[in-house]
Amino acid sequence: MSLPKELEKILEITREQNIWRRTQTLNLIASENVMSPLAESVYMSDFMSRYAEGKPYKRYYQGTKYVDEVETFTMELMNEITESKECDLRPISGTIANAAVFRVLAEAGEKALIAPVQAGAHVSHTKFGTLGALGIQHIELPFDIENINVDVDKSIKMIEQVKPKFVVLGGSLYLFPHPAKELAPHVHSVGAKLVYDAAHVYGLIVGKVWSNPLKEGADVMTVSTHKTFPGPQGGAIFSNNEELFKQVSRTIFPWFVSNHHLHRLPATAVTAIEMKYFGEAYANQILKNAKALAEALAERGFKVIGENLGYTKSHQIAVDVREFGGGNKVAKILEDANIIVNKNLLPYDKPDAVSDPSGLRIGVQEMTRYGMKEDDMEDIAELFKKVLIDKKDVNEVKKEVIEFRRNFLDVKYTFEDIRDLDKYSTKTLKLLI
Ligand SMILES: *Cc1c(COP(=O)(O)O)cnc(C)c1O
């Protein structure tokens, strides 16, 4: 039988996606990344079809001996690179990790203080997201617009006054580290817990270019495993507080996950090993690239925010593009030129401007992983200028983008001399038996 139309269609869509985003676009979404070929090989393994509810060696199903082994070993690796005592890899996303933690720390009706939306809080921290679904009240910490950050003095007063159950720091537009060390003693003095959401910056923490919140007084850290940490999509929870960790860990299953998508485990382990050996070089290059891109854009006349603060200390930069028609319009024009970014609220935007905010958020982590250096950031800035300032034909710029991207097709910061990758995936199984 020849291929049915439906099948041809889905195969073709997948092929187009792979060609487009893997070889032809500048991927500058701050929450995305690319796994190494080795991590992808082990991701495409039999683990993807299996169930293992519960914890290693205490499962509700049979057939899990290798799952137990891989899960235990991956947790050990993750604790090693995170310098933490406890790790749980079962949350299937950062949002689920937050849900489990928040649920343990407060009952419905109780209060949580969160970083303000202007300081980049994630929707899961708010009444519109996970916190709201759990019925926990959110109150925003005061914001300091000069420093594009949480206002420390005012926050201390608010913590003492409100006496919340917990305080959440960390954000999605996250240029400068939130003041965990400064606030932790005050959070603890009212009997509350400090949650640090490191979804975006976990790879920077492992790469030692961002302070480790667990060493700064955070009681628990939630992460995504696919943003600056370049693993499979997923979440994780870390803590050094065994009592608290036990409670959280009991909550994940059965409240927030049943099965935990087991093929993530070997792929997360491979990524952890890559980060152990190459993480510092990768993270240092991310910071250099982010700064270089901010400076190169500013030199060409773009309004990059945070100039007085050196633009950024993370993998991200934010650009005010109101003069070019606002974030919504500009992000679409850039996409036509194969430059992929997202529109974003800037600290001075009203929260309800989400569908047409003033800014763009740009992340350099993925292109760094493809080997880009500071000089290449100049080229990217020039491409932005051609589209938005020179108003060159987007199709022409798109051709230049495709040409430029051709030089960056291989994932770096990984083990290059592993030749027979298919051996580790299900692809060539029949040849192996
Ligand atoms: C991305 C993000 C999350 C959620 O992560 P998912 O893995 O997409 O569920 C949580 N918190 C912050 C601050 C984020 O930026």
Image: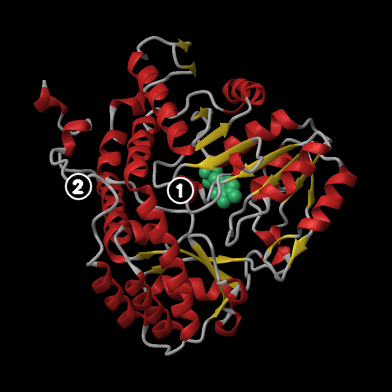
State the mark number for residue 146.
none
Q: Are marks 2 and 1 in contact (CB under 8 Å)?
A: no
Q: How is the model colour-coded? A: secondary structure
Q: Badge 1 local density, few (<14 within 10 Å), some, or many (20+)?
A: many
The quadrant where residue 214 appears: top right
Disc 2, SS: loop
Where, quadrant-wise, is the C terminus in this rendering?
Answer: top left
Q: Residue at x 37, y 22 (%)?
A: 50
As drawn, 162 above or below 147: above
Please, what secondary structure does the residue beneath circle 1 have? helix
The answer to which of 121 and 415 lies nearer the viewer is 415
Task: State the separation of the CA atoms marked 2 and 1.
Answer: 20 Å
Asked whether, in this view, residue 429 is left or right of residue 370, the answer is left
Residue wearing tag 2: 416
On the image, which quarter does residue 379 sit in? bottom left
Q: Position of residue 383 (x, y in %)?
A: 37, 79
Q: Is mark 1 within 8 Å of ligand 1?
A: no
* For residue 179, side relative to residue 36 (left or right): right
Residue located beneath label 1 in the image: 203
Along the line of sight, the residue nearer the viewer: 348 or 325: 348
* Residue depicted at x 40% and y 52%: 33
Amino acid type at mark 2: Glu
Instruction: Specify few, some or many for label 2: CA neighbours under 10 Å numbering under 14, 14-19, or 20 or more.
Output: few
Q: Horizontal placement of 270 versus 311: left or right? A: left
Across and down, in percent, residue 239 comes to: 59, 31
